[in-house]
């Protein structure tokens, strides 16, 4: 059969299955219908509820300003889709083109889109994690449960990890007048994402808000009472903190376990795909019927040295989902690349933080406008003599300019004057990111076999 | 006409009723520059980029090259009596004053201020429409103009008994933004100066009063409110109040008047709005794209030489960002000269972009939505008496001076 005829048939009466019924899944489904796909559309999601929005879960919801139940994502259009909610996907048979579900059912597809996202990294000791008062924050139920506990007025909340989510939680606690301790393994809050210079600003924000901030420590144990309620937390510096709520905020794990053994290039860092969102199999060969989008995807980006980036960014999920959906039902020459410039925002301690590009690739940082101590500034990150990222604190309206510098690979340090020049003096300085040789959660890949026909690749998951 | 440069034609009064063909010519080159001095940009993407460019100042002191294409500086509403308002300041001063002003006006500190005025705005609109009589009305005089002035009075906390005095000063000051050909400029300047002094004294008295007994109006909160940004000086409160007064209604008058004119030119849309007032929301967005009240931002100056699409705009040169041309850029909007309230992709420049993007945008939107919905619902068989109507001379704040409508009556 001729290729175009097959594509026409796919668009008319094909079967598309989307595993992951959250932001990326929903937007992809809408795009498919917008672009004229009239075949059968199935969305599979492990949660029983429809797609909802996550950014408010660590902000307005924790403040009691919005209810977790009222975060449903607005629909852009009618979908005419078959929703299989509350039934997780448990396996994939790529040869037979089938997705296996937890309830034993199997769903066949002609094109598959995986948007299974990430889940909160749990506390590694199951017995301690099971103590009453220990929370993670990722889903709607997590947020609602934590909010209820905060509303009840705990004597002290302890947050493990001062990344964006951990800092937002600490901020919400302080705004509610709750005592809060933050324990962070790095030298400062946000240091992994934005480096040490900005980490210092974040440190000051925590301290000014009255957070009991403990950096360069790890939590060694969560201790409970006889009734199974968490009571205190032991830290690596030998100290103990009494707390009746503990929020584990140690980043996320990509939801790829269900793909184990499927032959797809999926591991703890996500599912590798090309710039057109087509998934790679474990051998590094691109598939033509399995697509990936959102937090679970890892795609090469030409602007950033063709590194495979996986982004837990709201905007990326939307954009990548739309590209994936378009490409799933388009001929090769009509496909579009996903060349989104990474961007994210956070809101904490009354400050609006926004970032574009990949700050963590930057070796150097330079404040270009405003004042670090005033917490109203723009700073750019330099990588091998070019601008690679930018961050603003309450200065977000300038970001489009800096995004343009990143896209045009403008030189670093930027050679021009700006209005509102930095109070504390200009000039680049080391950005202060943690040593990249510190072990991460990456897998080990081994290659075996001698001839092209029998060479294979095996993943060994790295230590978590 | 052929002797005039493109920028002179754009500011020439005879083209005021339809500058859009000239904007199309402006977009033919990324940066337009001729003997008149200014560098003008009309393409959507470049205008938007320049609105976010930290090398471009809004302060007058960076100008080293005079702008001869327009007579007089536009939007100079304080006449040197007051310190520059935040529209004419760069960060960090801009950020400080705008943040303090925003505290009693919008989120995060006052998330309900604008929406909380909805009922009051509706009442004002209803009263104004109730008062329309006769078979021919000038919509500007009877409706588009009194509505926003009354609103700004309520917002600032001008006592009702003083509203008529306030209207008078506002009339005089707005008239100076719109110099009529042949008018005696000296006399006009004198009366404007007089109005400024009277308005200043009046506001100053009011501010003193509010310092003693603050209410929940904006003037009180500007006078006594304090947040991390500190408090405004008395002079800063005055120049901010004057800015809110002028910028806060001159533009809305034009938005409402342009809106009614556009609806009467598109009777099918007027009919849809009459049947369903919810159409007012997307309709006002499309209006801000299609007929923006602020056509261009002519008061920007690069603080260093900047290269824009192959042209170097020198430090100190006047730079015009023609947002109305950007809004009709076919490289950005499909079929841009068509008025289409069903447009989904509508990221227009009608309210600007970047740090100076319209401070009063939520209020202006709500005012225009309520006004147009009520006019559509209640005017019986409205017709344009003349098309095009006579325009104000101002090329920057563009809008009809009069909009004469024949009507069969007003529905009660």
Image: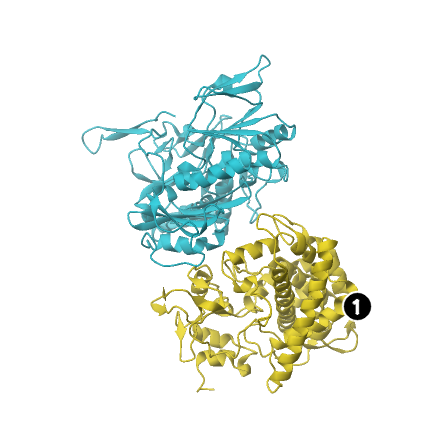
Chain colours: A cyan, B yellow
Query: How many numbered discs sit on the rendered protein?
Result: 1
User: Is residue A300 visible to the viewer in this orientation of the structure?
Assistant: no
For label 1, the SS is helix
| Neighbourhood count class around disc 1 (C-alpha, 10 Å): few under 14, some 14–19, many 20 upward | few
**Above or below for A26 versus B220:** above
**Above or below for B272 versus A381:** below
Chain ID at mark 1: B
Picture quarter containing residue B357? bottom right
Where in the figure is residue A15, as x and y percent of width and height? 46, 41
* Identity of the residue drawn at 45% across and 53% down: A399
The front one of B273 and B80 is B80
The front one of A169 and A323 is A169
Does A15 sit left or right of B99 as displayed? Answer: left
In the image, farthest residue toward the right: B412
The residue tagged 1 is B130
What is the quadrant of the C terminus of chain B in the image? bottom right
In the image, farthest residue toward the left: A450
Does B41 sit left or right of B71 as displayed? Answer: left
The front one of B225 and A23 is B225
Where in the figure is residue A172, as x and y percent of width and height? 57, 36
User: Is residue A149 visible to the viewer in this orientation of the structure?
Assistant: yes
* Identity of the residue drawn at 76% across and 70% down: B164
Picture quarter containing residue B189? bottom right
Where in the figure is residue B48, as x and y percent of width and height? 46, 62
Where in the figure is residue A247, as x and y percent of width and height? 53, 28
């Amino acid at each position: 059969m001729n290729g175009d005829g097959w594509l026409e048939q796919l668009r008319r009466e094909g079967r598309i299955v989307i595993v992951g019924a959250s932001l990326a899944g929903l937007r992809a489904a809408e795009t498919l219908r917008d672009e004229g796909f009239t075949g059968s559309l199935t969305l599979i999601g492990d949660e029983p509820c429809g797609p909802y929005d996550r950014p408010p879960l660590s902000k307005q919801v924790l403040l009691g300003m919005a209810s977790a139940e009222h975060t449903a994502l607005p629909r852009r259009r009618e979908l005419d889709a078959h929703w299989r909610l509350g039934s997780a996907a448990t396996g994939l048979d790529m040869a037979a083109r089938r997705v296996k579900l937890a309830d034993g059912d199997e769903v066949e597809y002609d094109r598959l889109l995986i948007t299974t996202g990430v889940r909160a990294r749990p506390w590694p000791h199951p017995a301690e994690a099971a103590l009453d008062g220990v929370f993670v924050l990722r889903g709607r139920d997590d947020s609602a449960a934590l909010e209820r506990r905060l509303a009840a007025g705990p004597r002290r909340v302890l947050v493990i990890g001062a990344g964006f989510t951990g800092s937002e939680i600490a901020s919400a606690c302080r705004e509610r007048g709750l005592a809060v301790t933050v324990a962070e393994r790095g030298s400062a809050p946000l240091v992994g994402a934005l480096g040490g210079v900005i980490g210092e600003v974040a440190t000051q924000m925590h301290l000014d808000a009255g957070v009991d901030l403990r950096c360069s420590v790890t939590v060694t144990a969560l201790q409970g009472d006889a009734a199974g309620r968490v009571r205190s937390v032991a830290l690596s510096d030998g100290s103990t903190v009494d707390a009746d709520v503990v929020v584990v905020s140690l980043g996320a794990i990509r939801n790829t376990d269900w793909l184990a053994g499927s032959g797809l290039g999926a591991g703890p860092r996500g599912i590798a795909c090309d710039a057109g969102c087509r998934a790679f199999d474990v051998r590094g060969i691109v598939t033509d019927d399995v697509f990936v989008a959102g937090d679970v995807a890892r795609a090469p980006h030409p602007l950033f040295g063709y590194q495979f980036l996986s982004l837990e960014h709201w905007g990326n999920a939307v954009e990548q989902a739309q590209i994936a959906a378009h490409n799933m039902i388009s001929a090769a020459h009509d496909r579009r690349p996903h060349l989104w410039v990474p961007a994210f925002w956070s809101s904490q301690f009354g400050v609006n933080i926004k970032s574009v590009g990949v700050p963590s690739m930057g070796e150097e940082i330079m404040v270009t406008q405003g004042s670090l101590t005033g917490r109203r500034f723009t700073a750019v990150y330099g990588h091998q003599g070019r601008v690679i990222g930018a961050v603003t604190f309450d200065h977000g309206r300038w970001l489009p300019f800096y995004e343009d510098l990143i896209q045009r690979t403008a030189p670093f340090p930027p050679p021009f004057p700006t209005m509102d020049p930095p109070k504390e003096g200009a000039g680049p300085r080391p950005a202060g990111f943690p040593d990249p040789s510190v072990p991460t959660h990456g897998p080990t890949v081994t290659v075996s076999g001698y001839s092209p026909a029998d060479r294979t690749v095996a993943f060994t998951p790295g230590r978590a | 006409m052929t002797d005039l440069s493109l920028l002179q034609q754009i500011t020439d009064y005879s083209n005021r009723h339809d500058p859009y063909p000239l904007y199309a010519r402006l977009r033919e080159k990324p940066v337009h520059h001729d003997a008149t001095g200014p560098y003008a940009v009309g393409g959507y993407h470049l205008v938007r980029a320049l609105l976010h460019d930290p090398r471009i100042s809004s302060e007058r002191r960076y100008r080293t090259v005079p702008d001869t294409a327009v007579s007089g500086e536009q939007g100079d509403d304080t006449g040197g009596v007051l310190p520059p308002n935040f529209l004419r300041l760069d960060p960090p001063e801009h950020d400080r004053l705008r943040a303090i002003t925003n505290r009693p006006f919008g989120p995060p500190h006052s998330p309900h201020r604008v929406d909380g005025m909805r009922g009051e705005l509706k009442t004002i609109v209803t009263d104004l429409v109730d008062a329309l009589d006769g078979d021919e009305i000038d919509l500007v005089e009877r409706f588009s103009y009194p509505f926003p002035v009354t609103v700004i009075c309520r917002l600032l906390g001008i006592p009702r008994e003083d509203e008529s005095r306030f209207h008078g000063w506002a009339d005089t000051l707005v008239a100076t933004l719109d110099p009529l050909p042949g008018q005696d400029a000296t006399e006009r300047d004198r009366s404007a100066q007089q109005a400024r002094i009277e308005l200043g004294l009046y506001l100053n008295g009011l501010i003193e009063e509010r310092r003693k007994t603050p209410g929940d109006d904006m003037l009180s909160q500007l006078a006594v409110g304090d947040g991390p940004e500190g408090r405004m000086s008395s002079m800063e409160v005055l120049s901010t109040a004057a800015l809110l007064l002028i910028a806060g209604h001159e533009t809305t008058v034009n938005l409402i008047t342009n809106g009614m004119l556009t609806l009467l030119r598109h009777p099918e849309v007027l009919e849809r709005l009459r049947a369903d007032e919810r159409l007012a929301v997307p309709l006002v967005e499309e209006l801000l794209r299609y007929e923006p009240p602020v056509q261009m931002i002519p008061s920007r100056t690069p603080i260093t030489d900047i290269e824009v699409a192959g042209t170097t705009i020198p430090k100190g040169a006047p730079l015009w960002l023609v947002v109305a041309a950007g809004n009709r850029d076919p490289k950005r909007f499909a079929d841009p000269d068509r008025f289409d309230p069903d447009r989904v992709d509508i990221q227009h420049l009608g309210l600007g972009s970047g740090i100076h993007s319209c401070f009063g945008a939520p209020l202006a939107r709500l005012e225009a939505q309520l006004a147009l919905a009520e006019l559509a619902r209640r005017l019986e068989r409205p017709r344009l008496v003349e098309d095009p109507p006579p325009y104000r001379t101002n090329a920057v704040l563009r809008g009809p001076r009069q909009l004469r409508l024949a009507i069969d009556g007003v529905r009660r």
